[in-house]
Image: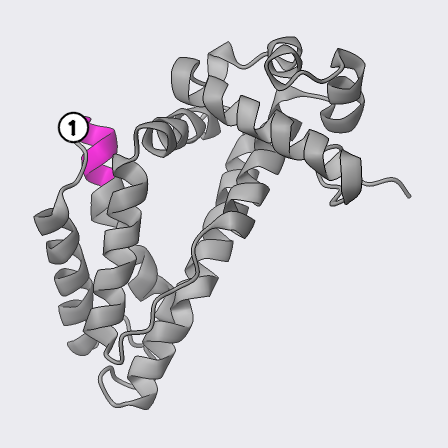
Amino acid sequence: MSAEPGTVRPGGRTARVRAAVLEAAGDVLAEQGFDGLDLADVARRADVGKTTVYRRWGSVTGLVADLLADMAEQSLPREETGSALGDLRANAALVRRTLADPRQGALFRAVIAAATCDARTAQALRRFYEVRVAEWAPCVEQGVARGEFPAGTDAEAVVRAVSAPLYYQLLTTGEIPDAPAAERAARAAHAAAVAGVYAT
């Protein structure tokens, strides 16, 4: 059974082709948004044969799905500071830096906008966040083990609560969250978790 386009993880020359195409796709998304993404243009930018791109990814949504999978794989690992609040602050700071990055912030806005009207992009975006939330959830679980949060605290819900206000600010106002906004987000999620809001 053949893999779905955009989901193969090969090595060697094919890996280099994939890296070049995904970088070009990210550039186009950041510059022109989802509507500006064209497989032929991506192939030209990546200096790759157009037929290779069409055969490998099959569609714009297949390419975006693979780009998001690659971004999840390449994202920085979680920081462990020794305290739950410190860890949540580190998570908030990472989200803020990502959204403040000229390329990454624009890329995420484009993908999020596309996900509202394209099912495959929405599915790929959900998978991306599932990977990132799962990466940081152990920080909350360790906080439960240390007695900082009540038993039964939903670790993934706490992690999502950290980034939610930062994305909301970006998407509803167009303003990039600053360091104080990240600090507030981390403290608010921490305080709610301590109070048992996320305990099941």
Relative to 55, say whether 66 is above or below: below
Q: Residue at x 23, y 79 (%)?
A: 83
Question: Is residue 152 or residue 100 the one in the foreground?
Answer: 100
Quadrant of the image occupied by residue 96: top left
Residue 182 screen position, x and y as percent = 17, 51
Residue at image x 40%, y 69%? Answer: 137
Residue 162 shows in the view: no
Asked if residue 105 shows in the view, the reply is yes
Q: Name the quarter where the N terminus is drawn.
A: top right
Q: Nearer the viewer, residue 197 or 165?
A: 165
Question: Of residues 160 and 106, which is closer to you in this image?
Answer: 106
Asked if the stretch drawn in magenta spans residue 30, the answer is no
Where disc 1 sits, the SS reads helix
Q: Nearer the viewer, residue 150 or 20?
A: 20
Image vertical order of residue 170 relative to residue 44, above or below:
below
User: Residue 20 sits in which quadrant?
Assistant: top right
Indicate the amino acid at tag 1.
Answer: Thr
10 Å crowding of disc 1: few (<14), some (14-19), many (20+) = few
Taking the magenta stretch, the answer to whether it contains residue 173 is yes
Residue 175 at x, y = what percent?
A: 16, 30
The residue range painted magenta reads 168-174
Q: Which residue is mark 1?
A: 173
Which residue is rendered at x = 41% and y = 22% of the image? 30
Report the residue at 59% width, 14% height from top: 45
| For residue 41, side relative to residue 75 (left or right) | right
State the image coordinates of residue 6 (x, y, percent, origin top left): 70, 34
Query: From the viewer's perspective, is 112 left or right of 5?
Result: left
Where residue 24 sits: x, y (%)?
55, 22
